[in-house]
Amino acid sequence: MAEEVENLTDTNMEQIKIALNTLYLCIGYSLRHISSREGVEEAVKFKAEMLNALKSGDIDMALLEERRTFDLIVSKVESLTIA
Protein backbone atom coordinates (compact mmCIF):
# COMPACT_ATOMS: atom_id res chain seq x y z
CA MET A 1 0.00 0.00 0.00
CA ALA A 2 1.23 3.49 -0.80
CA GLU A 3 2.03 5.85 1.99
CA GLU A 4 -0.85 7.97 3.22
CA VAL A 5 -1.46 11.44 1.82
CA GLU A 6 -0.69 14.19 4.27
CA ASN A 7 -3.55 16.02 5.97
CA LEU A 8 -5.58 18.09 3.48
CA THR A 9 -7.32 20.30 6.06
CA ASP A 10 -5.86 23.56 4.75
CA THR A 11 -6.49 22.70 1.11
CA ASN A 12 -9.35 24.39 -0.72
CA MET A 13 -11.88 22.49 -2.84
CA GLU A 14 -10.46 23.75 -6.15
CA GLN A 15 -7.02 22.38 -5.26
CA ILE A 16 -8.56 19.03 -4.32
CA LYS A 17 -10.44 18.86 -7.65
CA ILE A 18 -7.25 19.64 -9.58
CA ALA A 19 -5.30 17.02 -7.61
CA LEU A 20 -7.95 14.32 -8.13
CA ASN A 21 -8.26 15.05 -11.84
CA THR A 22 -4.48 14.98 -12.20
CA LEU A 23 -4.27 11.62 -10.42
CA TYR A 24 -7.03 10.27 -12.68
CA LEU A 25 -5.10 11.42 -15.75
CA CYS A 26 -1.93 9.83 -14.33
CA ILE A 27 -3.70 6.48 -14.01
CA GLY A 28 -4.82 6.75 -17.64
CA TYR A 29 -1.28 7.63 -18.67
CA SER A 30 0.02 4.60 -16.76
CA LEU A 31 -2.43 2.28 -18.53
CA ARG A 32 -1.40 3.65 -21.94
CA HIS A 33 2.27 3.28 -21.00
CA ILE A 34 1.80 -0.35 -19.94
CA SER A 35 -0.16 -1.01 -23.13
CA SER A 36 2.50 0.47 -25.40
CA ARG A 37 5.44 -1.21 -23.62
CA GLU A 38 4.03 -4.58 -22.56
CA GLY A 39 0.90 -4.98 -24.66
CA VAL A 40 -2.81 -4.41 -24.33
CA GLU A 41 -3.36 -7.69 -22.48
CA GLU A 42 -0.99 -6.63 -19.70
CA ALA A 43 -2.69 -3.23 -19.39
CA VAL A 44 -6.10 -4.92 -19.18
CA LYS A 45 -4.75 -7.28 -16.53
CA PHE A 46 -3.28 -4.38 -14.55
CA LYS A 47 -6.56 -2.46 -14.67
CA ALA A 48 -8.54 -5.51 -13.55
CA GLU A 49 -6.15 -6.12 -10.65
CA MET A 50 -6.31 -2.44 -9.67
CA LEU A 51 -10.12 -2.52 -9.68
CA ASN A 52 -10.11 -5.68 -7.59
CA ALA A 53 -7.75 -4.04 -5.08
CA LEU A 54 -9.94 -0.93 -4.95
CA LYS A 55 -13.13 -2.91 -4.43
CA SER A 56 -11.62 -5.10 -1.72
CA GLY A 57 -10.06 -2.22 0.22
CA ASP A 58 -6.48 -3.32 -0.45
CA ILE A 59 -5.57 0.14 -1.74
CA ASP A 60 -7.49 2.16 0.85
CA MET A 61 -10.00 0.72 3.30
CA ALA A 62 -11.50 4.19 3.81
CA LEU A 63 -12.95 3.98 0.29
CA LEU A 64 -15.34 1.29 1.51
CA GLU A 65 -16.82 3.54 4.20
CA GLU A 66 -18.76 5.91 1.92
CA ARG A 67 -20.83 4.36 -0.88
CA ARG A 68 -21.00 7.51 -3.05
CA THR A 69 -17.23 7.96 -2.96
CA PHE A 70 -16.70 4.26 -3.66
CA ASP A 71 -19.07 4.37 -6.66
CA LEU A 72 -17.42 7.54 -8.00
CA ILE A 73 -13.87 6.22 -7.80
CA VAL A 74 -14.67 2.75 -9.11
CA SER A 75 -16.72 4.13 -12.02
CA LYS A 76 -13.93 6.54 -12.97
CA VAL A 77 -11.35 3.74 -13.02
CA GLU A 78 -13.72 1.42 -14.90
CA SER A 79 -14.24 4.11 -17.56
CA LEU A 80 -10.52 4.40 -18.35
CA THR A 81 -9.78 3.17 -21.84
CA ILE A 82 -6.74 1.22 -22.95
CA ALA A 83 -5.32 1.81 -26.40
Image (cartoon, rainbow, N blue to C red):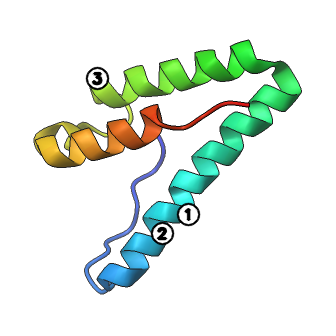
Q: Residue at x 87, y 28 (%)?
A: 37
Callout 2–callout 1 Cβ contact below 8 Å: yes
Residue type marked 2: Ala
Which one is in front in this view, the residue at disc 3 or the one at disc 1? 1
Residue 59 image position (x, y, % from top left): 38, 35
Residue under circle 3? 56
Looking at the image, is 78 positioned above or below residue 10?
above
The total of numbered circles placed on residues is 3
Q: Secondary structure at mark 2?
A: helix
Looking at the image, is 7 positioned above or below residue 38?
below
Closer to us: 59 or 79: 79
Closer to us: 74 or 54: 74
Q: Residue at x 48, y 44 (%)?
A: 2
Closer to us: 49 or 59: 49
Q: Secondary structure at mark 1?
A: helix
Per the model, the C-alpha gap separating discs 2 and 3 is: 24 Å
Task: Identify the mark at residue 22; answer none if there is no mark.
Answer: 1
Q: Which picture quadrant has residue 14?
A: bottom left
Farthest residue toward the right? 37
Residue 50 image position (x, y, % from top left): 48, 27
* Residues packed near mark 3 inside 10 Å, few (<14), some (14 to 19) or many (20 plus): few
Instruction: Work out whether mark 2 precedes mark 3 in sequence or the reverse, and give the earlier one.
Output: 2
Q: Quadrant of the C terminus?
A: top right
Residue 1 image position (x, y, % from top left): 45, 37
Q: Is residue 27 left or right of residue 30?
A: left
Residue under circle 2? 19
